[in-house]
Amino acid sequence: MSRLYDARIREFRESDLASVRRLIHQTIDVCYSGVYPPRAVQFFKDFHSEEKIMERHREGKILVVEQDGHVIATGTIVGSDIFGVFVQPEFHRRGHGEALMRELENKAKAGGCTESELSVSLPARGFYERLGYEMLEECSIDVGEGQRLDFWKARKPLTRQDF
């Protein structure tokens, strides 16, 4: 697949499942706990359970960024929808997320999609706007006990210049 400095992007293998889930849950703990209420944080973790990761693997493609034999980032494409893009916090701002998004968008384009769509968490808005995603709609999910999970629905046209 692609190489990024000392890391490479490759397709997910079932043997990556525990590492991918751990990466996602640790990243949620670090990046979302100060932004979202506890029930929203748990909602994110439930949405990225091993069972749901495997379901998305069967329905689409999961990519991982691997460095020195360790999974440091992941993302999924199912049709034109991108899910579960997470980069270990210590690897933020090194280009891994952008390279991963480019690969996911390439997969969407290869599958005949003319745009990609995703849900954007509060901490990730700036990242996706820099990549050309337009925030279309503010959304909120009631996660109980008066707590909410706020996010945006976003879309980006996939044009030739993106690849």
Image (spheres, grey):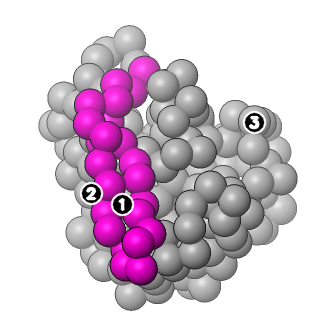
Residue beneath the point at 57% across and 75% down? 38
Residue beneath the point at 32% across and 68% down? 142
Residue 138 placement (x, y as % from top left): 31, 40
Whether residue 116 is visible to the viewer of this picture, yes or no, is no
Query: What is the residue that sits farthest to the front in this orientation?
Result: 146
Residue 18 placement (x, y as % from top left): 60, 85
- The reply, left or right, for residue 128 in relation to residue 27 is left
Distance CA(mark 2)–CA(mark 1)? 7 Å
Q: Residues within 10 Å of mark 3 (few under 14, many from 20)?
A: few
| Range covered by the magenta-colored residues | 131-154
Q: Which residue is mark 2?
A: 78
Residue 141 placement (x, y as % from top left): 31, 63
- The reply, left or right, for residue 118 in relation to residue 102 is left
Q: Amino acid at mark 1?
A: Lys
Quadrant that contains the C terminus? top left
Asked if labels 1 and 2 touch by Cβ distance under 8 angstroms, the answer is: yes
Q: Is residue 95 above or below residue 32?
A: above
Q: Main secondary structure of the magenta part?
A: strand
Residue beneath the point at 54% across and 22% down? 130
Q: Which residue is mark 1?
A: 61
Q: Amino acid at mark 3?
A: Arg
Lower sequence index among marks 2 and 1: 1
Q: Residues within 10 Å of mark 2 (few under 14, many from 20)?
A: some
Distance CA(mark 2)–CA(mark 3)? 25 Å
Question: Does the magenta run of residues contain 85?
Answer: no
Which numbered disc, 2 or 3, marks the residue closer to the eye? Answer: 3
Q: Which residue is mark 3?
A: 93
Which numbered disc, 1 or 3, marks the residue closer to the eye? Answer: 3
Q: Amino acid at mark 2?
A: Val
